[in-house]
Every structure is written in C-alpha cells, then in structure tokens.
Image (spheres, rainbow, N blue to C red):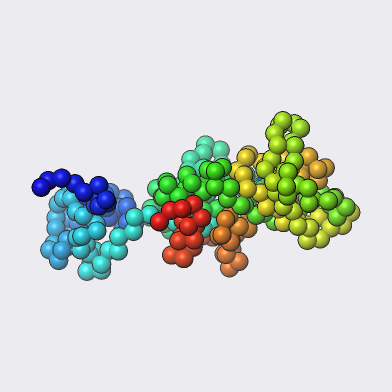
Amino acid sequence: MGLLCPFIKKEPNIRLDRFLANQGFGSRSEVQKLIKKRFVKVNDKEVKDPSIHIDPLKDKITVEDEDVEYQENFYFMLNKPSGYITATYDENYPTVIELLTDEPIKDRLFPIGRLDLDTEGLLILTTDGQLAHRLAHPKWNIEKEYYAIVEGDVSKIDFSPFEKEGIYLKKDKYKTKPFKVKVLSSSKEESKILITVSEGKYHIVKKIMQSLGHPVKYLKRIRMGNLKLDKNLEIGNYRPLTEEEIKNLKNLVNLE
Ligand code: URA
C-alpha cells in the first residue's frame, strides 16, 4: 500500500482561487471576491476559503450554480494584423496578446512560432507548452504556407529544383530546407504566389524571395501543418480552436 502506480497520471491538486483564475473567472483577487460572496460551491457546498485545495478532475465546482468545465489548456487562432509584434511583452510595439481583449486567460497565452511585425495571418496562441515546443521544433518539419506578393515577374523562374534541394542563401551562408512555390499570377510589376516552407528561421520567406531577386511586398500566413486560417476570421480577430483542430495538430506531433 502507499505505492504510486507509475501508469496512473497524477491528478492535479490546486488552490481553488488559482483554479478559477486559470479557468478564466478573473484575476486571483477577483476570484477571491466571488468566493467571499459565496458564489462558489465545491461538491454542492458553499465555500468561503479561497485557499482550499481541490481536484479539478474529481470535484464538482460551480460558480453561481453553473458547472465549471475543467479545461487544462487553451488554444486560439488569431488572424494577425501588421503592426503587432509576436511576443508576450514589448516596450515599443503592441503585442499579439493585446488583441485577445476579451480573454480572461490571455496572460497565460504565448504564440507558437513567430510572424514578423509586418506579416499578417495565422498565429496559434496557447497555454500548452508541449504542443508549442513540438510544433516549433525542426524535427517535426511542420509546413507553413504563405500567400505573398513579391516585386517583379516570377513566371520565368523554374521553382521545381527548390522542392528537392532548397536554396543557398549567400548572405546568411545558409542552405534552406526544400520549399514549394505556386505562382498564382504575375505581371511586370508584381507576382502573387503561395510559398510553403518547413522551417521557422527568421525572415525565411523574405530571404528566399530576396535572394531570387523578388523582394516580398506583402506576406500572410494561411496554413500551419493541418490548420488553415479560418476564412471567416477577419484581420485582428481570433477564435478558440475546435476540438477537431486541436486533435489534428496534436496528431501531427505524436501527442495523445
Ligand atoms: N518568413 C518571413 O520572412 N516572415 C515571416 O513573418 C514568416 C516567414
């Protein structure tokens, strides 16, 4: 007796106020007020002590008689606008986190991968460190697809060798991983392309296109792995990922 079976996941035990704050019911002090006002019940009993410990997997917690559904992690898709920095804190620019205005747990979120200040499009924000780490890790070769407008006419370029070999970026002394380009339209002034890379190196798309003599004028990420940017999500808006989307992302990197 007393031995812990190594195959049983240790169930979390957490202070009530911390648990409710994590679940998005406000800051620790706001949640403490809720508890003091007797709005919170644990297993159908009113509680007044915010420091009691509960087990979110076993105990029934209600706030104003509404069940609190335990969610371990949070996942959002943001359609990032230009002018926001992909960071949780910055002295000079507004951060992508600031766009999640209505999200009580926004201070726990961090972005997966980076988009440049002037890049738009799909950014995943989560509290799930393990998923974030894996999706960003080079080992998993997660594809990132971008829509780009570049200077000049690219219609004469044969992009097919890059699908096997990547390209050598002289300035960086760096050989990229293989990447794919599909030309959507081109004129003398500019071309519209889809470009799919599978690495997270800083400015990778801009560097590739610059090295081919066609600097990027506009860049927007439209896909990451199997997750596409929701066409109904307006620029600057966000939404939670669906269960299906979370499952598909986790499958990509052998989680669950
Ligand atoms: N490549 C870039 O050059 N910029 C981005 O923001 C993302 C990929």
Q: Position of residue 33 (x, y in %)?
A: 22, 54
Q: Residue at x 84, y 58 (%)?
A: 186
Q: Position of residue 103 (x, y in %)?
A: 42, 56
Q: Nearer the viewer, residue 234 or 110?
A: 110
Q: Residue furthest left?
A: 1
Q: Residue at x 51, y 55 (%)?
A: 252
| In this view, 86 is above or below 124 | above
Q: Residue 34 vs residue 122: left or right? A: left
Q: Residue at x 57, y 64 (%)?
A: 230
Residue 219 in sight from this viewpoint: no
Q: Position of residue 118 (x, y in %)?
A: 65, 47
Q: Residue 225 vs residue 195: left or right? A: left
Q: Nearer the viewer, residue 15 or 130?
A: 130
Q: Residue 228 vs residue 98: left or right? A: right
Give the image quadrant in which the ligand numbered 1 is located.
top right
Q: Residue at x 17, y 61 (%)?
A: 42
